[in-house]
Image (tube, coloured by chain):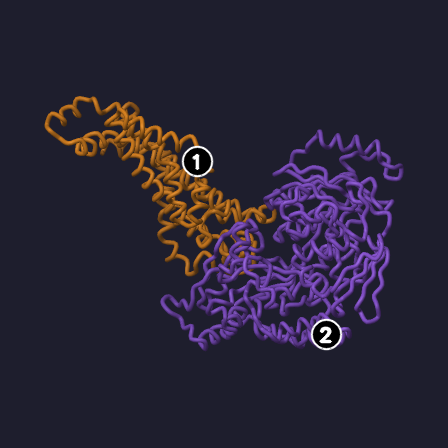
Amino acid sequence: MDFDRRAMLGAAAAGMLARPAWAQKPGTTARMRTINAMMTDEPAHLNYPLFNTRIMQEICGNINESLLLFDWQFKPKSNLARGHEMSPDGMRYTFHLRPDVAWHDGAPFTARDVAFSCGVMLPQLNPRSRGAFSHVREIKAVDRYTVRFEMKEPFNAFLLSLMASSAPMMPAHIYEGTNFRTNPYNFKPVGTGPFKFNRWARGQYIHLTRNEKYWRPDQPGMDGIYYRVCPTPEQRLVAMESGAVDLAMADDIDTVVNKRMVANPNVVARSDAFNGTGEICVMEMNHRRWPFSDRRFRAAYMHAINREFLVKAINFGLGKVAHSPIPSDLPYYDDKALTKYHYDPARARALLDEMGLKPGKGGVRHRFGIMMIPDGGGYWTRMAHYIKQALSEVGLEASLESTDWPTFSRRSGNWEFDVDCNSYGQYGDPAIGTARFFLSSNIRKGVPQTNIQGYNNPEVDSLFAKAAVAVDAAEAQAHYSRLQQVLTHDVAMLWMFERKPMFFYNKRLKNVIMGPNGPADGFGSVRLA
Amino acid sequence: MKDFLRVFLSRPIPLIGLVIFVAIVAVALLAPFVFARGPFTIVGMPLLPPGAPGLLVGSDVLGRDMAVGLAYGARISLLVGITSTLCAVGIGVLLGAVAGYYGGWLDDLLMRVTEFFQIIPSFVLLMVLVAFLQPSLSSTVIGIALVTWPQVARVVRGEFLSLRGREFVQAARTLGMGDARIIFTQVLPNALPPIIVVSSMMVGTAILTESALSFLGLGDPNLLSWGSMIGGSRSAMWVAWWTTVMPGLAIMITVLALNFIGDGLNDALNPRRRR
């Protein structure tokens, strides 16, 4: 852990000159007013919507802000939009923007940026915006600080789709008319947030520094953030325990040592920091190949796995068995609609017998590959090893395939796999985070994180479409209940467990987690405790 | 031969090495007969300490019996260590003998090739090779053989250079022996002692290298080796010491035993040291 002394001193000196009086706390040093965080691996660039993963949300959440924030009950709060109205029929949304917001390069933030972000850039790049903004007919900049969204149909999750992690505002004056994938600003991002990009030392750290002209007068409470590359789990644990870093987010600390971290008196442990994501760990099957195309095979696969053991032993109790595509603590979950697949190896064998997969030489019924997530021996690797063992008990021989991230993305996107491991987030509403994995219209070769299984069910397509535009909450619930019934009966995906990642921070900080979107809402509110 | 055995066995260090090594070989060979279940079978909760009911060395992060894992890991380590050394010695002896015996431009050419392999950091080259060939047992063996043969080639060439002008070689030539026959029946037997010493050390190095590869996740994911046991448990290092210490000890003891044997061979085969 080597600190770049010169950069730190430079940042400190700049801070001394410009910091307003309120930010001075007697006896604090630049080192104390800097947040140190970790990255398990480095992103390829910092274009938020182009690669919307958790590590990007944790970094770019400080740079690119959203129109709205959400409280713990998922009720909208003002952010870049100081107010908004919806017409009674749900066909028109009007947003009133704050007039005092500027981009980090000084350009004013206006309605043009919103129209560009929501109308052009996000639908093209951001995997969750594509579906959400497809319900929008037209985005009009009424005046400099007013934007109107005219809808094709009333889309009931529209406001939720503006959550920070789903719809970050991007600068029109930098991206409009350029190639979004090769724009040089992908490596020095410009936003409106409490922290601005300062320096990226490849292989070492990304440094954000305070935005002196931030529109919230009392933020940011800190001078800057270092995200340090910390590739191994034991290194990350030591860094957190020794206080060398202040934050450990979802994948930073292996669940093996969770108890030890929770017991640490210098550390605050939060299990609610990722509630807004609503993550489910799953396995996906390539439905184009036999026997994965057979419902009975998928059901047998589920019966063969002891998912209680998976949560309790493999993930050290962090999480809950998933029985539905919708997380059990989020709206629309319907326990009565579900077909549940409990641990029952005898039932698994019977199903395999029924479809003609009889034990052959050495008791093996079928051989196939499981593509592993390259997490460097963390819970994903352990899950794959456990599942290989559990499947062998019913005569299925899985060989584990190691990958690196580029290989994983390429093979899953091009449908070159039998079974893989993955996880998805609901992000507030099934129409935003969940539908994209089941809609036949989202079978896109070459694009990972789509319906790569090739699941195709016209009834499911139409139910998702109807549920998204239902004006009445009870009607939406009816569609989602039926969806859960169909999808679980089909075993449309192999749901393993609902993941509840932990967020740890050093006690010297406060106001770190302010809502269900957790670190994705940025660290502007963080202060010294 | 009698002399050799007397010297080798008369010293305690090589004897200890030999006893340990034989014991490890026995464990590796007998593992499937001693343990009813394979090394991947999950027998209970994870991270149970050594001495928990039925678990001599505890359980790992997946709740697998580590004693079974250590026994099966010995099979992989020895298999990789011995086969990759045999391959490396084969390549090294052949190229070193030809270079040393003929000399001239052939020697220059072969030695430049050898140097090419020696100047690249061998572990980096190995990682590239294994990643390129896809991680598996055979790619590990091939990779290790390809990065270690230059060491043998160098030693063999040196021996051949000093032996090729000796009287007994000239005598063989006068008798009308062909080059191949001279190399294999006259010179090679006399060059064997250093080759044996070097290769006994190389087995140990190969075991270490395989462990390092597996630790980094570049081993065969469907086989359990000592290195992959450490790699898979590294996040549990601070809460369950035995998950990393036990396979680490197994590697250390095996490599140490092989080095003891190598030292003993060196002493016993060296005519000056024998007296």
Q: Between residue B210 and residue A119, name the one nearer to us.
A: A119
Chain A painted colour = purple
**Vertical relation: A478 (above or below) A60:** below
Q: Quarter of the image holding residue A77?
A: bottom right
Residue A477 is tagged as 2
**Share a chain, discs 2 and 1?**
no
**Label 2 crowd bin: few (<14), some (14–19), many (20+), radius 10 Å:** some
Mark 1 secondary-structure assignment: helix
Distance from Cα at disc 2 to Cα at disc 1: 62 Å
Horizontal and vertical percent position of residue A319: 65, 61
Q: Between residue A382 and residue A136, name the one nearer to us.
A: A136
Residue B122 is tagged as 1
Tag 2: residue type? Gln
Chain B painted colour = orange
Chain of the residue displaying label 2: A
Horizontally, residue B21 falls left or right of residue B231, namely left
Q: In this rendering, does residue B58 appear at all?
A: yes
**Label 1 crowd bin: few (<14), some (14–19), many (20+), radius 10 Å:** some
Horizontal and vertical percent position of residue B198: 34, 33
Tag 1: residue type? Ser
Horizontally, residue B248 falls left or right of residue A211, namely left
Q: Tell me what residue is drawn at x 28 percent, y 26 percent.
A: B105
